[in-house]
Amino acid sequence: MLRLLQESCVSKRPIEVIYMADNGSVTQRSIIVNEIDGKAIKVWCLLRNEKRTFKLNNILSCGFKDIRKRGLAQ
């Protein structure tokens, strides 16, 4: 997971994360990682359209969204 977050930071490519807030609510977010800081990441959240900080331990999963349509890749 950390490798994918680092790749987003370097490439500035959006990454999809499933995040659990401290209150237990779960959301799916598209983010661009700006900085990885110990136990947290500083990001641009495309859902909220603002800077946010997420705890690494609260990220349940992450991955780059495949923009190619299945069966149409060249």
Image (cartoon, helix red, strand yellow):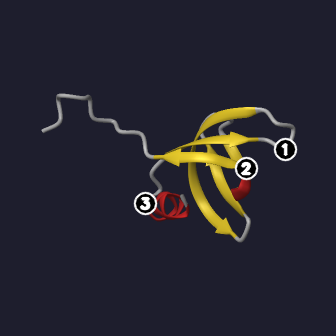
Residue named by callout 2: 58
How far across and how far down the image is residue 11, in percent? 43, 60
Residue type beneath disc 3: Ser
Q: Nearer the viewer, residue 43 or 25?
A: 25
Residue 69: give x, y in percent of width and height: 26, 29
Please identify the quadrant where the N terminus is shown: bottom right
Mark 3 sits on what residue? 11
Q: Amino acid at mark 2?
A: Asn
Cα distance in 3D space between marks 3 and 1: 29 Å
The local secondary structure at tag 2 comes to: helix
**Which quadrant is home to the C terminus?**
top left
| Local secondary structure at mark 1 | loop
Asked if disc 2 and disc 1 are in contact, CB closer than 8 Å, the reply is yes
The residue lying at 27 percent from left, 35 percent from top is 68
Do the CB atoms of the residues marked 3 and 1 lie less than 8 Å apart?
Answer: no
- CA separation in Å, label 2 and label 1: 8 Å
Residue at 17%, 36% in the rendered image: 73
Disc sitting over residue 22 in the figure: 1
Q: Amino acid at mark 1?
A: Asp
Residue located at (84% from left, 44% from top) = 22
3 and 2 marks in contact (CB < 8 Å): no
Vertical comparison of 67 with 11: above or below = above
Disc 3 or disc 2, which is closer to the eye?
2
